[in-house]
Image: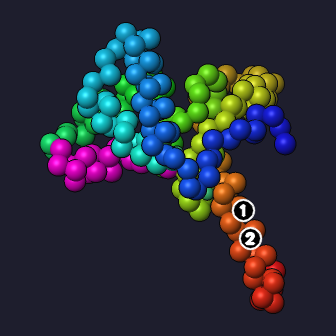
Amino acid sequence: MPEDLLGIPFPAAAHDHGRCVDEALRRARAAFERKGLKFTPLREQILREIAASHSAVGAYEVRDRLLAKGGRRLSPISVYRAIDALLYVGAISRFKSRNAYFARHNEEGASSRVVLACQECGRVAEIDGARVFRAIQRAATQEAFVPADAVIEVSGLCVNCAKRRQSGRASRSFRGEGG
Ligand SMILES: [Zn+2]
Ligand SMILES: [Zn+2]
């Protein structure tokens, strides 16, 4: 397995997610401070909603959830502005093909990331894609093409769902229901 696939942040299904949220908030606060920007209550609320799971959520869903919790009705533009600020400091990432956002639960660092999305549980994670992007750059250069933006989003099965599938298959075959 390539080394950049190690330590993929797909935590076990039963983990203390409160800690993930706390960490995401702590990192966001520090990132806003570094950029000399304010981590406003709205930005924090929106980050909390996005970080509430390891899945990606759309802007309108975030807005509806906040409203359902008794918050004021936010205009889409104010939600998008807060999301833009969160993207800018690197607190969240965009899941382009689904027009959704997810919190960065792993350390920031690499700028060229590959998004991994589980088709079964909907969790999304990122890995360092430096080598993939270098390969694209090289291939494009050979064709005298200058790439401006590349998005790599891979769908598949996360480690938890793959394990669950495997054990499901194993127990079926023990009962003689085939492999
Ligand atoms: Zn978590
Ligand atoms: Zn999964």
75 left or right of 104? left
* Residue tagged 1: 163
Residue 101, percent from left and from top? 45, 41
Give the Cα separation between the discs numbered 2 and 1.
Answer: 6 Å
Residue 113 position (above or below residue 155): above
Asked which secondary structure carries label 2, the reply is helix
Q: Which mark is residue 167?
A: 2
* Pointers 2 and 1 in contact (C-beta within 8 Å): yes
Q: Which residues are magenta?
A: 55-71
Residue 151 marker: none
57 falls in the magenta region: yes
Q: Mark 2 is on which residue type?
A: Ser
**Residue at image x 81%, y 90%?**
176
The residue lying toward the viewer, choosing from 149 and 5, is: 5
Q: Is residue 174 above or below residue 151?
A: below
Crowd band around label 2 with a 10 angstrom C-alpha radius: few (<14), some (14–19), many (20+): few
Asked whether residue 101 appears in the rendered view, the answer is: no
Residue 83, image x, y percentages: 36, 33
* Residue 76 within the segment the image draws in magenta: no
**Amino acid type indicated by mark 1:** Lys
Does residue 69 appear left or right of residue 133 in this picture? left
Place of residue 58 in the rendered image (x, y in percent of width and height, measured from the top left)? 39, 47
Dividing the image into 4 quarters, which one contains the N terminus? top right
Query: Which quadrant, please, contains the C terminus?
Result: bottom right
